Image (cartoon, helix red, strand yellow):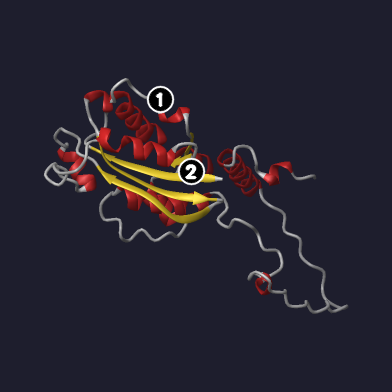
Amino acid sequence: MRQIVLDTETTGLEPSQGHRIIEIGCVELVNRRLTNNRYHQYINPEREIDEGAIEVHGITTEFLADKPRFGEIAEDFVNFIRGAELIIHNAPFDVGFINHELKRLDGGSQPVDSFCRIVDTLVMARQLHPGQKNNLDALCRRYDIDNSSRELHGALLDAEILAEVYLAMTGGQVRLSLEGRGGSEPGSRPEPRRPLAPDRPPLKILHASEAELRAHEARLEAIDAASGGQCKWRRADP
């Protein structure tokens, strides 16, 4: 399964007001593992950048003056993401801007959601952590992910951080090792277990609380949504 974690930076908040994309950053996941395949591009928006936006990402009009326009990079960008599942935090914002840029091209173009599946990690986070902050910084704190290099927003850096957050939110490891640490390396054999003492006390059984059961169900729903209905725990026999 090929997934692209994507982020953009823009001149402002509303494409309907003529705002444009100025940076695109993408990192690739294949079978839930990060690859070295990345896409990163600064873009000349052919307009001024709002002061409020500069305070967020630090990108100036002067810096972008010699960068290519969206029409010049559109084909390479679309080819990079085509057919992948896009992982985006607050997807309507980024997808809205990308579709606005594609629509501006000569003859128009298909919207990105017609050739990519979209997964919104903000929606997932709100399901998992209702009533809590679910921006990227808050999620990094919650999942113990280092974002100390994130003084300003940047599309590629934010995409890399979001990839780690997404993997943590949806279960972390690709495969569970049930054989202990001794069997974690390919080809290794688990250490033999010692037999249980015959006079050992009975094990204490701890049952999940209602809150823990609700949290578990929310996690399964998020995994099911992210995997396109392929959550094995949902299909397991009772």
Q: Residue furthest right?
A: 198
Q: Point out which mark residue 47 bears.
A: none
Q: How many marks?
A: 2
The residue type indicated by label 1 comes to Gln
Q: Nearer the viewer, residue 52 or 71?
A: 71
Q: Position of residue 50 (x, y in %)?
A: 16, 36
Q: Position of residue 61 (x, y in %)?
A: 14, 41
In the picture shown, does residue 26 fall above or below 195? above
Q: Position of residue 80 (x, y in %)?
A: 41, 42
In the picture shown, does residue 193 fall above or below 47? below
**Separation of disc 2 and disc 1 at Cα?**
29 Å
Q: Nearer the viewer, mark 2 or mark 1?
A: 1
Q: Residue at (14%, 35%) from the top-left corner?
A: 48
Image quadrant assignment for residue 56? top left
Q: Residue at (65%, 59%) from the top-left corner?
A: 176
Of marks 2 and 1, which one's residue comes earlier in the chain?
A: 1
Quadrant containing the N terminus is top right
In the picture shown, does residue 229 fall above or below 154? above
Residue 89 in view of the camera: no
Q: Residue at (55%, 49%) from the top-left corner?
A: 170
Q: Nearer the viewer, residue 132 or 83?
A: 83
Residue 192 in view of the camera: yes
What residue would you read off at disc 1? Answer: 110
Quadrant containing the C terminus is top right
Label 2 neighbour load within 10 Å: few <14, some 14-19, many 20+ = many
Label 1 neighbour load within 10 Å: few <14, some 14-19, many 20+ = few
What residue would you read off at disc 2? Answer: 125
The residue type indicated by label 2 comes to Ala
Compared across the picture, whether 196 is left or right of 38 comes to right
Which SS class for mark 1?
Answer: loop
